[in-house]
Amino acid sequence: MKIYILRHGEAKDESEDIKRPLSEKGETDIHKIGNFMKRTGIKVEKMYHSTKLRAKQTAEILAQYIEIKDGLKEVNYLEPNSDVNIFYNKIFLEETGDFVIVGHLPYLSIFVAKLLTGNENKKIIEFKSGSLLCVEKNILNEFIINFFISPEI
């Protein structure tokens, strides 16, 4: 199983738009990540995203580039300050195929720390807007980093 963990693209400032949609740069960055994923032939079962507009827009752009068997799924447990244990437990109990998570900070950093080390308080990675981490479950049922990429690369 591979999990592709994507921080939403750069969003407009709250003073500009309270809903914080993607900025023009944010959209461009996600198209770059989408092109990368398409070129590498990535296909997934599902794509989960939070209820925030910027995450939904990021997921919709990405969906233009990769095959998603069961489509996009909006969930409320991927919000910036959600409890990472909800999705962590879901992965081990329910998920079997590859999937994408589109979310926010600090959630994604905490989630990755829990996934890789079992300790959500360890600082493992800092997600810039639009950056993508791929982790893969090995035969020992542990997650390891497969790759990490940002739109600048």
Image (cartoon, rainbow, N blue to C red):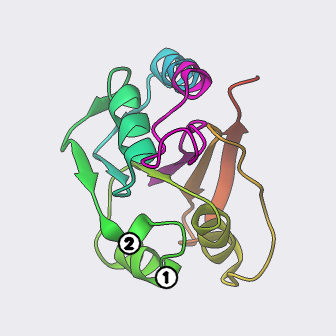
- Residue furthest right in the image: 123
Residue shown at 65%/39% (left/top)?
131
Crowd rating for badge 1 (residues with CA inside 10 Å; few <14, some 14–19, many 20+):
some
Pinpoint residue 52: horizontal percent, then vertical percent: 39, 54
Q: Which span of residues is magenta-colored?
A: 1-29
Q: Amino acid at mark 2?
A: Tyr
The residue identified by callout 2 is: 77
User: Mark 2 falls on what kind of element?
Assistant: helix
Quarter of the image with the C terminus is top right
Mark 1 / mark 2, whichever is N-terminal: 2
Q: Amino acid at mark 1?
A: Asp
- The verdict on residue 23 being magenta is yes
Q: Is residue 89 left or right of residue 27?
A: left
Residue shown at 55%/21% (left/top)?
24
The residue identified by callout 1 is: 83
* Mark 1 in CB contact with mark 2 (< 8 angstroms): yes
User: Mark 1 falls on what kind of element?
Assistant: loop
Residue shown at 70%/84% (left/top)?
119
